[in-house]
């Protein structure tokens, strides 16, 4: 069993007996059609029932990273579309007659 990184005075809302301890666990979440796993993710775990709640600050940082990565993919995809459309329009221009 891993030792606590930090103890808290917050009682577990599930069992109302145990205290939460900050430990590292694996984070699982769906991002679109893909499952994301992050090892050694900061989590608050009850010492009695084992309920796990992920650290809110770490989750928000992860979401901002995933959102920025998704935005970058969307921007890159749209750039490719614009370039291919521009290339097609240049190749379809009628030749000037003199």
Image (cartoon, grey):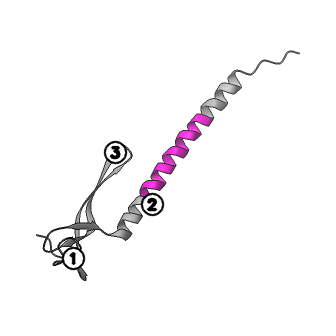
Q: Which residue is under mark 1?
A: 21
Q: Which residue is under mark 2?
A: 64
Does the magenta portion include 88?
no
Residue 76 coordinates in the image, percent (x, y):
53, 43
The mark nearer the N terminus, 1 or 2, is 1
Residue 65 coordinates in the image, percent (x, y):
43, 58
Q: Magenta stretch: dominant SS?
A: helix
The mark nearer the N terminus, 2 or 3, is 3
- Per the rendered image, the range of residues in magenta is 65-82
- Depth order, front residue of 52/41: 52
Nearest to viewer (mark 1 / mark 2) = 1
Quadrant showing the C terminus:
top right
Residue 16 coordinates in the image, percent (x, y):
19, 77
| Label 3 packing within 10 angstroms: few (<14), some (14-19), many (20+) | few
Residue with the most extreme right position = 98
Residue 22 coordinates in the image, percent (x, y):
24, 74
35 relative to 70 in the view: left or right? left
The mark nearer the N terminus, 3 or 1, is 1
Quadrant showing the N terminus:
bottom left
């Amino acid at each position: 069993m891993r030792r606590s990184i930090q103890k808290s005075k917050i009682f577990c809302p599930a069992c109302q007996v145990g205290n939460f301890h900050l430990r590292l666990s694996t984070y699982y979440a769906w991002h679109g059609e893909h499952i994301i796993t992050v090892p050694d993710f900061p989590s608050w775990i009850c010492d009695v029932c084992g309920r796990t709640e992920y650290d809110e600050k770490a989750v928000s940082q992860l979401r901002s990273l995933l959102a920025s990565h998704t935005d970058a993919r969307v921007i890159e995809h749209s750039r490719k579309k614009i370039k291919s459309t521009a290339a097609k329009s240049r190749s379809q221009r009628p030749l000037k007659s003199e």
